[in-house]
């Protein structure tokens, strides 16, 4: 199976989960990226079952609307049963490294309002230790150089994502060369650096359910 076929299979499994487990007329949180895009395409087939969605990026918002799926503002939503999103890396404890698509801030915000975070990945994303994939960090533009110095002190090699501006008007530093032994502690440490808006570790609030696509089928894992 190709990686896209695996992503498609796990997206369908997530839509099946929504159809079977989520109460009808719920509002769903929807992530960003190629796996999330496959999920949006699957969600379109069961759109009559859901009331609306909250999108974690302008790209996902547009794709949802193109499918005729209603998108509402997060400020009008008190809680959502489920948030579905991909990841760049995920551990067996379901801590994630995210933000390869640059949507980490809105992803973390939307996920915070959801009862259950369902991570949808192909098997290449499951790792024992995160950091091989460069860690995305969203930064206020005027703080870029200062934040880069602080990240270097922590042992990383930050590189500006050239030509990229987030949906929030900020820049991304991709931090190379990390080997993250304690993801929740490192997430908390990065949260203390002034100028960082959001870091791409989702460990303090990990996923609740991982749907992992393998050539043998989709595995469900809980942390
Ligand atoms: C976007 C993300 C994505 O979930 C992550 O990059 C995985 O993307 P893909 O499904 O395309 O592999 O965090 O900001």
Image (spheres, rainbow, N blue to C red):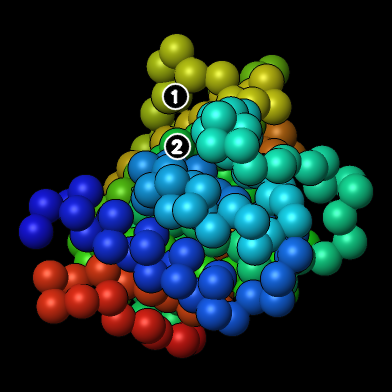
Disc 2 or disc 1, which is closer to the eye? Answer: 2
Outermost residue on the front side: it is: 48
Q: Earlier in the sequence, mark 2 or mark 1?
A: 2
User: At 65% across and 63% down in the image, what residue appears?
Assistant: 49
Q: Residues within 10 Å of mark 2 (few under 14, many from 20)?
A: some
Residue sitting nearer the eye, 127 or 74: 74
User: At 70% across and 71% down in the image, what residue appears?
Assistant: 24
Q: Residues within 10 Å of mark 1 (few under 14, many from 20)?
A: some
Residue 210 placement: quadrant? bottom left
Residue sitting nearer the eye, 44 or 106: 44
Distance CA(mark 2)–CA(mark 1)? 14 Å
| Mark 1 lies on residue | 160
User: At 31% across and 49% down in the image, what residue appears?
Assistant: 133
Left or right of residue 151: residue 155: left
User: At 61% across and 37% down in the image, what residue appears?
Assistant: 68
The location of residue 150, given as percent across then percent down, is 57, 40
> Vertical placement of 85 versus 137: above or below?
below
Residue 45 seen in the current view: yes
Q: Is mark 2 within 8 Å of ligand 1?
A: yes
Residue sitting nearer the eye, 149 or 130: 130
The location of residue 46, given as percent across then percent down, is 54, 58
> Vertical placement of 168 versus 47: above or below?
above
Disc number for residue 101 = 2
């Amino acid at each position: 199976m190709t990686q896209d076929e695996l992503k498609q299979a796990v997206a369908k499994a997530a839509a099946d989960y929504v159809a079977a487990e989520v109460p009808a007329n719920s509002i769903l949180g929807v992530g960003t990226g190629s796996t999330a895009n496959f999920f949006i395409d699957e969600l379109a087939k069961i759109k009559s079952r859901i009331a609306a969605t909250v999108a974690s990026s302008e790209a996902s918002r547009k794709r949802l609307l193109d499918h005729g799926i209603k998108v509402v503002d997060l400020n009008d939503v008190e809680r959502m049963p489920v948030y579905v999103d991909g990841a760049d890396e995920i551990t067996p404890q379901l801590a994630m490294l995210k933000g390869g698509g640059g949507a980490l801030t809105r992803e973390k915000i939307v996920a915070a309002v959801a009862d259950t975070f369902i991570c949808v990945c192909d098997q290449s994303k499951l790792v024992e230790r995160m950091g091989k994939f460069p860690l995305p960090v969203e930064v206020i533009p005027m703080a870029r150089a200062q934040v880069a110095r602080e990240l270097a002190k922590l042992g990383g090699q930050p590189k500006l994502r050239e030509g990229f501006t987030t949906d929030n008007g900020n820049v991304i530093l991709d931090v190379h060369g990390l080997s993250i032994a304690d993801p929740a502690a490192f997430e908390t440490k990065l949260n203390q650096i002034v100028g960082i808006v959001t870091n791409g570790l989702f460990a303090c609030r990990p996923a609740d359910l991982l749907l992992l696509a393998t050539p043998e089928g989709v595995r469900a894992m809980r942390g």
